[in-house]
Amino acid sequence: MQVEIATCVTQVNDMSTALYFSPQPTRSRRAHWAFLEAEADFVPHEVDIFAGEQNEPAYRALNPMGHVPTATFDSQAVSESAALALIVCSEAKDLVPPSGTAAWRAALQWVIFAPAELDPQLATLNAHRLLRPLAERIASVAAQAEEAWIQRAQRLEATLTGQPFLLGESFGVADICVGHSVVWAKMHDLLPAGSVLQTYLDKLQARPAFQKVYGGPIEVYPDPHAG
Ligand SMILES: N[C@@H](CCC(=O)N[C@@H](CS)C(=O)NCC(=O)O)C(=O)O
């Protein structure tokens, strides 16, 4: 893998697009899903974060924080999953509304809402319900994050009641960005059966690009520290 990343860095001076993503369930799936929906032409590179490949100097040269995802466009390294989704979907047909329209403003709102309002709650739940050893978890911090998620989920549900996607009848970049957070919430068992958000997730899960990236319907993630 080290060789592969090093090779990519030396090849980054060409005009191609590359996506660095982890095989694990991370925010790189948001970007990967967008690349497939946009039918973007790109060179895929796996970065196994469980093996520490995000810390190799060649990858850090692309993403100094050692986070996934990263993409390179014409030699320029760009990070942030929602930004990457917006970049590739802007090049595609029908995934981003025409610039300057009311629909475009609404799309941008949801593209930012996902990483700004939804992901932080889910990252806290990751730490305090899954990743940290039991003794290092703080139940009240997790409960606070869940409460914050529920408030934000209510906003999503209000929008999605009576329409299949965030902007109405058409799927687009807003659904990729928010949809990834909804996937994450499902992994934390935060979508009650029959809820508006579960119905929304079912629609997203039916998409071929989703299935390629997420591997099928999303299941609740087991606690790796549970006895
Ligand atoms: N805001 C960033 C977050 C990226 C991020 O934190 N990625 C995590 C996985 S979800 C990561 O790379 N973790 C590896 C590490 O911290 O070593 C985005 O949306 O792309």
Image (tube, rainbow, N blue to C red):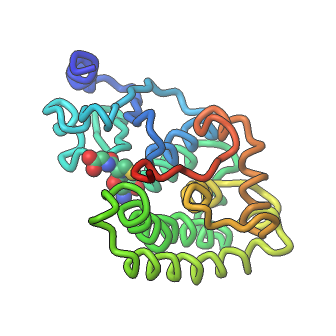
Residue lying furthest right in this view? 162
Residue lying furthest left in this view? 57
Q: Is residue 227 left or right of residue 13?
A: right
Q: Residue at x 59, y 79 (%)?
A: 150
Q: Tell which of 18 and 16 is nearer to you.
A: 18
Q: Is residue 37 left or right of residue 118?
A: right
Q: Residue at x 60, y 39 (%)?
A: 214
Image quarter for residue 115? bottom left
Q: Identify the image quadrant of the N terminus.
A: top left
Residue 93: x and y in percent read 68, 44
Q: Tell which of 21 and 14 is nearer to you.
A: 21
Residue 19: x and y in percent read 41, 33
Q: Is residue 151 left or right of residue 81?
A: right
Residue 27: x and y in percent read 45, 50
Residue 156 in the image: above or below residue 114: below
Q: Is residue 79 visible?
A: no
Q: Residue at x 56, y 49 (%)?
A: 90
Q: Tell which of 125 and 85 is nearer to you.
A: 125
Residue 135: x and y in percent read 29, 65
Residue 184 in the image: above or below residue 159: above
Residue 1 in the image: above or below residue 55: above
Q: Is residue 224 left or right of residue 202?
A: left
Count of labels in the image:
0
Q: Is residue 25 visible?
A: yes
Image quarter for residue 200? bottom right
Image quarter for residue 102? bottom right
